[in-house]
Image (cartoon, rainbow, N blue to C red):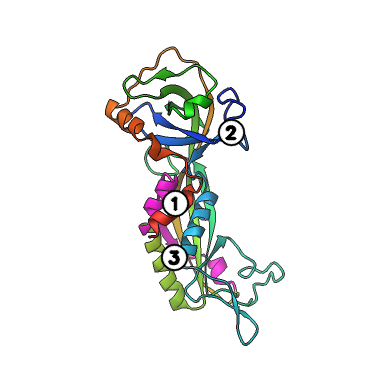
């Protein structure tokens, strides 16, 4: 999230504030933090790309199905935890050796692997079925107001905020742009035998159902199973693995903040009760520098 330098004082430390959507009675709430290292605002808990989602997924699998460090077998080859999962983008070298373009059998260095790749990405559909109808072809302005705590407002340079009578804190108008994207992600699931790969495929589909809420909490707008496919190119690869492929639909949103605009009056349409609730719980939204670690710990207890 980019920001104009007129928003914050030059020596501002880490701080955060809350942004509320100003078009609904139950507003969407976003947390924004100032990063002094790069002198910019950034969204917190807003996974906005498939790569960021996959990074979170990789950390999740390290908790659930850790691969562990390799141990050397009596034959001199590495051995990993038999239930562990190697998770990475398409394609690691042991699955598609760059030095062996004929896909001749390569040593299976891990027992199970899941790889991923985006097979389709388009601007998000505004209504109806994804990939059809009217699309959000470029970032559009969103109407939001920012709620500053007593701590955060000290680092705001513009006197463009209005006090929240009776609740404390300040309100200011924030210019935000966002664009949604529809994605189809293909997950390729690899194992040493047909039975193992079928078992791992069923496990992965269950995992995606069980942890949908974790990805939504981290910033993914929507995700669901699309279909299972047979990728004949990969099925014919002679690399020592059997493979199955599944497609998932994932909706992401890229958000950025430009600047604070001078305001003369704020016409709020949000619920007063919602505003009071947010104001009363500002401390609950303090930025956690290990935000995704906290989410992972919450979902994997």
Picture residue at 49% right of the left edge, 63% below the top: 62
Residue labelled with disc 3? 64
In front: 83, or 44?
A: 44
Is residue 271 highlighted in magenta?
A: no
* Left or right relative to 56: residue 164: left
* Quarter occupied by the C terminus: bottom left
In front: 258, or 10?
A: 10
Q: Residue furthest top?
A: 264
Would residue 135 be visible to someone looking at this image? no
Residue 60 image offset from top left, x and y in percent: 46, 59
Picture residue at 42% right of the left edge, 64% below the top: 204
* Left or right relative to 42: residue 142: left
Lower position in the chain sequence, tag 2 or tag 1: 2
Marks 2 and 1, how far apart at CA: 23 Å
Lower position in the chain sequence, tag 3 or tag 2: 2
Residue 16 image offset from top left, x and y in percent: 48, 34
Residue 137, label in figure: none
Picture residue at 27% right of the left edge, 29% below the top: 273
Marks 3 and 2, how far apart at CA: 35 Å
Residue labelled with disc 2? 40
User: What is the secondary structure assignment of the residue under circle 1?
Assistant: helix
Picture residue at 33% right of the left edge, 32% below the top: 280
Lower position in the chain sequence, tag 1 or tag 3: 3
Q: Residues within 10 Å of mark 2 (few under 14, many from 20)?
A: some
Marks 1 and 3, how far apart at CA: 15 Å
Is residue 232 highlighted in magenta?
A: yes
User: Quick check: marks 1 and 3 in contact, CB under 8 Å?
Assistant: no
Residue labelled with disc 1? 294
Residue interval drawn in magenta: 210-237
| Residue 221 sits in quarter | top left
Q: Please determine whether, in this image, residue 101 is positioned above or below residue 180.
A: below
């Amino acid at each position: 999230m980019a920001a104009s330098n007129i928003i914050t004082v030059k020596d501002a430390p880490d701080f955060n504030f809350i942004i509320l959507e100003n078009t609904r009675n139950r507003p969407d709430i976003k947390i924004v933090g100032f990063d002094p290292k790069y002198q910019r605002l950034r969204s917190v808990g807003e996974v906005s790309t498939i790569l960021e989602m996959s990074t979170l997924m990789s950390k999740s699998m390290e908790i659930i199905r850790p691969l562990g460090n390799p141990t050397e077998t009596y034959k001199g080859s590495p051995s990993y935890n038999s239930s562990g999962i190697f998770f990475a983008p398409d394609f690691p070298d042991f699955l598609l050796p760059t030095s062996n373009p004929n896909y001749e059998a390569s040593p299976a260095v891990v027992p199970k692997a899941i790889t991923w790749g985006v097979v389709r990405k388009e601007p998000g559909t505004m209504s109806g079925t994804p990939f059809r109808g009217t699309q959000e072809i470029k970032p559009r302005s969103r109407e939001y107001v920012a709620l500053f705590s007593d701590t955060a407002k000290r680092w705001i340079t513009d006197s463009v905020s209005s006090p929240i009578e009776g609740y404390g804190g300040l309100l200011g108008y924030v210019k935000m742009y966002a664009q949604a994207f529809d994605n189809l992600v293909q997950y390729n699931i690899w194992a040493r035998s047909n039975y193992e790969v079928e078992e791992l495929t069923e496990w992965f589909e269950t995992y995606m159902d069980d942890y949908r809420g974790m990805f939504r909490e981290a910033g993914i707008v929507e995700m669901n199973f699309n279909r299972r496919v047979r990728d004949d190119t990969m099925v014919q690869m002679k690399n020592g693995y059997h493979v199955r492929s599944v497609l998932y639909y994932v909706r992401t949103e890229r958000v950025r903040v430009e600047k604070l605009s001078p305001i003369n009056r704020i016409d709020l349409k949000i619920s007063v009760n919602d505003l009071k609730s947010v104001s009363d719980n500002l401390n609950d939204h303090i930025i956690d520098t290990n935000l995704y670690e906290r989410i992972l710990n919450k979902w994997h207890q």
